[in-house]
Amino acid sequence: MSCLTIGAFAQAGSKKASVPTSGSHTPYVYFMMKNGQLMEYDHGRLSKVTADVTLPNKTTIHPNATINLADGHVVKLNEGEYIAMDGKIRRLADMAKP
């Protein structure tokens, strides 16, 4: 029973450590406009978005860079901007460098 308890604490500690605690970090997954195309950056790999993507907060990103926000507003992602998995649009220039 002791081993099970120790394993549970180690697992919980590892999961918590992997979650960034500040707002100034480079996200692992985000979507950005690059040369007029919507691209997904996923853990170092860049690929073209060819189908709708729905984020955890119910924001939908379309391949033409139109975004249906969770609150019902519709916006367009522009060159130099990105949207992270939290559904917030930010400027690429403001992204923290690793």
Image (spheres, rainbow, N blue to C red):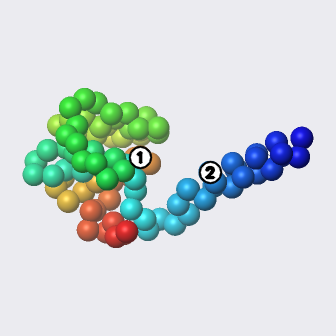
* Residue 21 coordinates in the image, percent (x, y): 56, 63
Q: Secondary structure at mark 2?
A: helix
Q: Look at the image and tell me in which quarter the C terminus lies.
A: bottom left
Q: Residue at x 88, y 46 (%)?
A: 2
Circles 1 and 2, Cβ within 8 Å, touching? The answer is: no
Give the residue furthest to the top. 51
**Residue 74 at least partly seen:** no
Q: Is residue 92 above or below residue 4?
A: below
Within 10 Å of disc 2 (Cα), the crowding (few <14, some 14-19, many 20+) is few
Look at 20% across and 59% down and name the residue there: 80
Residue at 34% in and 70% down: 97
Mark 1 residue element: loop
The amino acid pointed to by label 2 is: Lys
Decide which of 66, 50 is in the foreground and name it.
50
Question: Which residue is tagged 1?
Answer: 85
| Disc on the earlier residue, 1 or 2 | 2
Q: Quadrant of the N terminus?
A: top right
Number of numbered discs? 2
Q: Position of residue 66 (x, y in %)?
A: 23, 39
Q: What residue is shown with label 2?
A: 15
Q: Residue furthest front?
A: 3
Amino acid on which the number 1 mark rests in the picture: Met
Q: Residue 57: image x %, image y %?
A: 46, 39
Q: CA distance from mark 1 to mark 2?
A: 18 Å
- Residue 46 seen in render: yes
